[in-house]
């Protein structure tokens, strides 16, 4: 994303999607390009843009929680969002593509539809002549909703659950508004936001269509993919024992190897660790989600609202009914997000890719409310043993959440020195390569882009897999430039696990055709001339 931002800022490139990923909008790259013009090209400048994006998402999440659940729940949501493990911090500060946009656009669309449901235009103007300020206010609200939907769909289709629920909210509570001039303003905002998506899909071949690419990622057609019951069990295991706890703030208490997860390999005593720690966390989360879904189930309340005209319902009662239904739809967003992820190939093949559950950050109030309702509403001590036990359990779970957030934050701070060491090692490697006049190299996926950006594209890298076969080089001109210098082949490996294919290193060492050098954490193999 940083390289894409650099190209936008200084080479007048205008990509629609992240290089090599034709379903993930390049919004973060364009924001990064603005920061590069202001502060110069650096990872720091790129993350300043991400920090701005995260701040906007944080405000929207807070306002949504306050509108639907109240100020106390909103403040707790804010507390749980601004801290946490590095896994939570990563999509908030790193330009991974589509993650923060999903949180921002998802929370903004749900916030606007919720506010409009409580204050629809056709009711707010009852008995008054339409004023210019009223028209402008609601025009901006509906136009912003359409714009947020369009940008969200362009950025990542992970936002779809929030968009679907927002549409249902508007259809139930604001249908008269949608039958007025406001629908044209909404459509105009949607058209502006979704224009990059439309232009790309009109010009791209069908196989490269963003929707086709996304659906291809969702299927289970990866090598050696299991089928039937075996597939379902792996998807369920990967989601419950890895993806869900990590995506909802569980710190990395263990060095979890996916092969010890149930149904990924033979069950051993090591399998008890993820089952107890991470499975227990998922059980608590899903239990709280079920409780809130049941409590907010609209049922007869929704039927009562649909049968009666809004004007005939007492305003306070109407607001209470709508908030209950809004809570249900917010819980529905959680279920749709989980179902979409758990039914995908990713849940079975790469359960550590929990960033696809980033939308759960918007729905923190859903699982917090069952805990906080007792903590804040039960003012007096009760002698009822059952009630006391329930309150004790709620307090324990709430305390556990806060403790894990604090522990995860400490872990994140402790990782800073290691990150600085890595940056310095990369700088030393770039200096070494310059000293030997090396400008084109082969390396691993997690090494290449970082070296290219840090060297200001003076070093170009093409990605190889563990067998030294071509890997995923997202920007194809890099691969073409490196391949054109086959007579001066240079391989770079890391001494740690980032790119350390043992068989390939052994082969190059024994061949006698390469000179071996070392620079900090890196091994360099240069073909003898």
Image (cartoon, grey):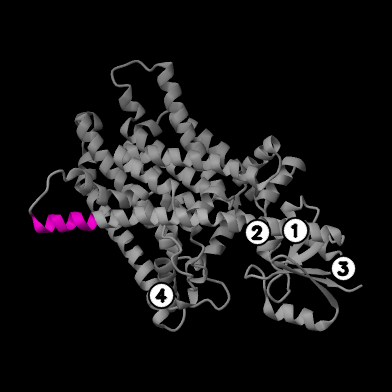
Badge 1 is on which residue? Answer: 428
First-in-chain label (2 vs 3): 2
Q: Which label lies toward us, 4 or 2? A: 2
414, 67: nearer the viewer? 414
Q: Quick one: 292 or 214, which is closer to the camera?
A: 292
Residue 161 visible (yes or no) = no
Gap between marks 1 and 3 measured at Cα: 21 Å
- Local secondary structure at mark 2: helix
The Cα–Cα distance between marks 4 and 3, rounded to whole angstroms, is: 48 Å
User: Which quarter of the figure has residue 509?
Assistant: bottom right
Residue placed under numbered mark 4 in the picture: 233
* Residue under label 2: 422
Name the N-terminal-most of marks 4 and 3.
4
User: Residue at point 32% right, 57% down?
Assistant: 400
Q: Secondary structure at mark 4?
A: helix
Magenta stretch bounds? 384-394
Please tell me how crowded label 2 is: few (under 14), some (14-19), or many (20+) other residues with Cα within 10 Å. Answer: some
Image x and y of residue 186, in percent? 48, 34
Nearest to N terminus: mark 4 or mark 2: 4
Residue drawn 45% across the image and 69% down it: 254
State whether the magenta stretch is mostly helix, strand or loop: helix
């Amino acid at each position: 994303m940083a390289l894409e931002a650099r190209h936008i800022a200084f080479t007048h490139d205008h990509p629609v999607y992240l290089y090599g990923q034709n379903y993930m909008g390049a919004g973060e790259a364009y924001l990064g390009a603005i920061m590069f013009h202001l502060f110069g090209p650096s990872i720091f400048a790129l993350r300043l843009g991400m920090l701005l994006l995260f701040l906007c998402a944080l405000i929207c999440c807070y306002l949504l929680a306050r509108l639907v659940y109240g100020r106390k729940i909103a403040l707790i949501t804010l507390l749980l969002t601004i801290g946490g493990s590095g896994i939570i911090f990563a999509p908030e500060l790193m330009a991974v593509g589509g993650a923060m946009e999903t949180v921002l656009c998802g929370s903004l669309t749900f916030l606007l539809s919720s506010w409009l449901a409580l204050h629809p235009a056709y009711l707010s103007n009852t008995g008054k002549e339409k004023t210019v300020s009223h028209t402008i206010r609601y025009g901006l609200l509906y136009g912003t909703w359409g714009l947020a939907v369009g940008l969200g769909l362009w950025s990542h289709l992970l936002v779809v659950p929030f968009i679907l629920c927002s549409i249902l909210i508007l259809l139930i509570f604001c249908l008269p508004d949608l039958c007025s001039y406001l629908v044209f303003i909404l459509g105009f905002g949607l058209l502006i936001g979704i224009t990059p998506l439309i232009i790309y899909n009109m010009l791209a071949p069908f196989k490269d269509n963003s929707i086709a690419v996304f659906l291809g990622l969702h299927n289970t057609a990866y090598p050696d993919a299991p089928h039937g019951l075996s597939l379902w069990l792996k998807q369920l295991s990967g989601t419950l024992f890895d993806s869900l706890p990590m995506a909802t703030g569980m710190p990395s208490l263990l060095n979890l190897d996916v092969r010890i997860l149930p149904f990924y390999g033979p069950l051993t005593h090591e399998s008890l660790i993820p089952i107890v720690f991470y499975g227990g966390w998922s059980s608590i989360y899903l239990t709280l989600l079920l409780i809130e879904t049941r409590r907010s189930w609209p049922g007869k309340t929704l039927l009562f609202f649909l049968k009666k005209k809004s004007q005939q319902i007492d305003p306070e009662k109407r607001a209470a009914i709508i908030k209950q239904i809004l809570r249900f739809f917010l819980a529905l967003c959680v279920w749709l997000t989980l179902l979409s992820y758990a039914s995908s190939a990713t849940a079975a093949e790469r359960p550590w890719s929990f960033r696809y559950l980033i939308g759960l950050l918007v729905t923190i109030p859903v699982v917090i409310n069952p805990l906080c309702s007792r903590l804040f509403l039960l003012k007096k001590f009760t002698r009822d043993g059952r009630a006391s036990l329930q309150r004790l359990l709620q307090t324990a779970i709430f305390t556990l959440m806060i403790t894990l957030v604090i522990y995860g934050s400490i872990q994140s701070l402790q990782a800073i020195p290691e990150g600085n060491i890595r940056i310095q090692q990369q700088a030393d490697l770039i200096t070494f390569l310059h000293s030997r006049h090396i400008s084109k190299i082969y390396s691993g996926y997690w090494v290449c882009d970082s070296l290219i950006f840090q060297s200001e594209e003076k070093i170009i890298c093409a990605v190889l897999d563990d067998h030294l076969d071509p890997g995923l080089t997202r920007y194809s001109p890099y691969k073409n430039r490196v391949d054109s210098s086959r007579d001066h082949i240079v391989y770079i490996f890391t001494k740690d696990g980032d790119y350390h294919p043992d068989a390939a290193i052994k082969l190059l060492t024994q061949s006698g055709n390469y000179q071996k050098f070392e620079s900090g954490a890196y091994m360099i193999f240069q073909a003898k001339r």
